[in-house]
Image: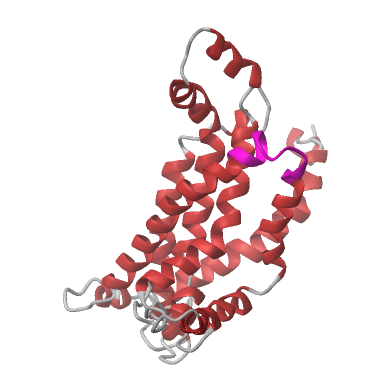
Amino acid sequence: MADASLSAPAPKLTSGFRASLPVLFLLVAGFLAPLVTVAAYAFATPKSFDVFRSFTLQNFAAIFDPNNTVWTSFVWALALAFACVAILLVVCYPIAFGLNKVFGKWSGLVSVLFVFPLFVSENVRLYGWVLFFIKNGVLDGALKWLGFSGGPELLYTPGITLFGMVYVYLPFMLFPMTLGIAMIPRDLVDAASDLGAGRFMIWREIELPLAMPGILIGALLTFVLSAGAVAEAKILGGQSVITITQDIEVAFTYAQNWPMGSALALILVLIVSGLALTAMARLDLDKILGKR
């Protein structure tokens, strides 16, 4: 009697799985493999390249050493990221509301104006602001031409670093927020108005909750990007504050201590991903994507 297991047909791959294989390959090669490599380096011997051949916690012990001040870099990076998100929430909401309700046929042009800077390199745009704020630059020269003594010393300060982050990441907050506001049914707002609800009550009870998925996506995207920002602190801030991404860059370049840089990067990934997953848990993706 033939073995039943030998005669059983081999399991067939579904068409959906076969169609997803290119995407899965790209995810593994472009995301998972580098992340695994960084994680492996984080446990390698300090100042070596013994990846996958050694395992030690010395890098993390050095980071968590009370005498190590690297945590100030984490604090600066996260504080600037939270401040950037808070400012953009206030700045972008009126613009997003205008794109949906006020600008009318001009909404497309206004949107293009916000998208157009993305076609120019971020570093080029930031150096443009350096020329604007630097002593004897555009702002300083214009104020002197108007009879003032000159412009304030804004360049190379934490404040100008935050300004650069707000400027660079504004589109990443604006357009998800615009999408969220576009999801608000007009007839629902009209019905609330007919029933006597005031403008503030309509905004608080109807518009804000319905737009919240888009707002949260914009805030999440902005936070993740700004937590890893480095060009703003180096170009505009002049390293007046040192963010964790700068420490990671130094570890991988000048210090040639890849295990330490990987350990710092792994901790940053865990912190940011933990905050991101907490926010994602509050999002109803089916509702956002219109599946129900």
Q: Position of residue 242 (x, y in %)?
A: 35, 77
Who is closer to the viewer here, 95 or 65?
A: 95
Q: To which quarter of the image does residue 119 belong? A: bottom right
Who is closer to the viewer here, 268 or 26?
A: 268
Q: Total marks drawn?
A: 0
Q: Residue at x 66, y 41 (%)?
A: 99
Is 55 placed left or right of 3 in the picture? left
Residue occupying the far top of the picture: 195
Residue bounds of the magenta highlight: 97-107
Who is closer to the viewer here, 147 or 199?
A: 147
Q: To which quarter of the image does residue 240 belong? A: bottom left
> Main structural element of the magenta stretch: helix, strand or loop?
helix
Q: Position of residue 133 (x, y in %)?
A: 48, 79
Colour option used? secondary structure
Is 93 placed left or right of 75 in the picture? right
Q: Position of residue 11 (x, y in %)?
A: 77, 39
